[in-house]
Amino acid sequence: MKVLIIDDEKGVLKMYSEYLKGGGIEALQATDGQAGIKIARVQKPDVIFLDIIMPHYNGFDVLKDIKADPELKQIPVFLLTNLPAESSGDKAKSLGAAGYLVKAQYEPKMILDIVKSAATYKENPKA
Amino acid sequence: MRNRTEKIVEVATWIVLIIIIFGVRFLPVKLLDNDSVYILIGGIASFALLYYLVIYKYFARSKRIYLKIIADVVLIGVLIHLLKDYGQYFFALYFLPIAAAALELEFINALLSATIASLFVVFEIFLSSQDLLPDSNQFFSGAWQIAIILFITIFCRMLAIQIRQERTAKEESILKQKSLELEAERQKEFLSLTSHQLFTPLSMIRGFISMLNDGTLGKLSPKQKDAVREIHTNSVRMVDLVDELLSISRIQAGTFTLDKKFSRINTIVQGSVDSLCKSKQNKNVKIIIEKEDLPPINLDPDKIRQVMLNLLDNAIKYTPAPKSLVRGYTKTNVTIRTSATKDGQMVEIIDQGVGIDQADFEKLFQPFFRGKNILELDNKGTGLGLYISRIIIEKHGGQIWAENNPNGQGATFSFKIPAM
């Protein structure tokens, strides 16, 4: 199973990747939005975690591009940010995000749980 | 410059209106055959069209525009009155200022124009019925009519000034409202960014510490493990504290809003319990859910989840390690019960904790209040959770309250939300 994390904070990438690897998940990393889309097109990850505030190309732009791409639009994209849900949650939903997670409230273990749930759903969507 | 021009146009308009009033008044009625009436109607309609299309459009933003409309109504009323037998041809002219007011101004101005027009008609009918109308052919007998016209004109002007003041007050109120909305938007943006800036380092601290704590980053000595567990607990507390302080700031800034959708309260209860069991060590407190089958109701699921987490967290935190369990709650320490009420749904969280001191009930849901019994337990809460819960429930139109259990052990925190 492959997970792509797009975040300009290297510490965040390291933290989540480390934990996911420990859980047997292949964690791909991108430090900006455009690089993230390129990796997604080549690697076709099962789940994408996406930060919102990033230089040049923000998380919403990346989400729009992913949802507009016929080959990527099926991939569940979770926004993983420190912006409160009240300010950006509605926009995220309207653009097709699978979920909105505030980093400070989601420890790496919880992110792994979400990845596992997403995998279970993918294998058996009616479950 | 614009004000001066407006003033000149207004004075000119009034002069024209008075000249027309006097002109028509002193025109011998017998000279008016049908053709002349149509010519007169055409002339007045052209004047009205010119007035509305040119002057009115030019001064569309002027606050004095309704004065001109009222003046028109007065003029038309006077014409109808003075032309006696021919007056009926002019009734349609009332529609010009009334329609203009309705289309361009507010409802109240249109209503006022229509009212003044009606007043003239009623006044005319009244005078006719009382046989009080003087012979309009007599050259000077209409002097009192002119006095009435001038009186009504002055009355209309006073009324218009009153409306202008109200309109100005309304405009000021709209401006104030817009300014408040802008301020609220700025506050919201500021709080979002503050939240981001505070949470960014905290999320890294909490994340890495949780990895150290669960052994992902290697084995720790017992002493290191103790220290890391303490740091982890406090990092979680810090996140909760920042979250609650930001909620308080949103409440104070007036940007704390609900995003309601039809949701099942039982799903929220179950989700909150799952989330709490995963994220916190709960001192072996067992949570039992007794749920009634309830239909979805209109609520903000995220905010109700926040209330549930606050109440559950309190129930667990303030429940000491069980010494002797009371009958009726055997094997359980915290019970969550959901049920239907007459006009909505209710959730009760029943704990077996220290209970609430009688003197604390009134202040329980106030900000930063910490109960005496709670302080004895050495639990470090923010004192904001219950206050935020109260705000959330009240925003839903519901109620939240607490009471000590009748068996003397622990307390029950309950909230109910109306179905509509």
Image: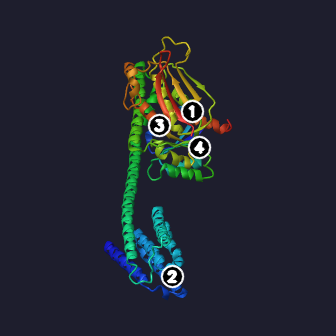
Q: Looking at the image, how many numbered discs can be counted on the residues?
A: 4
Q: Say whether mark 3 and mark 2 are on the same chain.
A: yes
The disc label shown at residue B345, or none: 1
Q: What is the number of the mark on residue A76?
A: 4
Q: What quarter of the picture does the C terminus of chain B occupy? A: top right
Q: What residue do we see at 48% from left, 31% from top?
A: B400
Measure how far apart labels 1 and 2 are at the Cα level.
69 Å
Whole-Å distance between the Cαs marked 1 and 4?
A: 34 Å
- Could you tell me if residue A103 is visible in this image? yes
In front: label 1 or label 2: 2
**Chain to which the residue tagged by mark 1 belongs:** B
Q: Are marks 2 and 4 in contact (CB under 8 Å)?
A: no
Report in which chain the residue with disc 2 lies: B
Above or below — where is B184 with respect to B418? below
Which of the two discs, 2 and 3, sits closer to the camera?
Answer: 2
State whether discs 1 and 3 lie on one chain: yes
Q: Is residue B62 visible from the viewing direction of this image?
A: no
In terms of image quadrants, where is residue A46?
Answer: top right
Judging by the rendered image, the residue that carries numbered circle 2 is B41
| CB contact under 8 Å: marks 1 and 4 | no
Q: Are marks 2 and 3 in contact (CB under 8 Å)?
A: no
Mark 3, chain letter? B
Between the residue at mark 4 and the residue at mark 3, the CA separation in whole angstroms equals 36 Å
- Name which residue type carries label 3: Glu
Image coloring type: rainbow
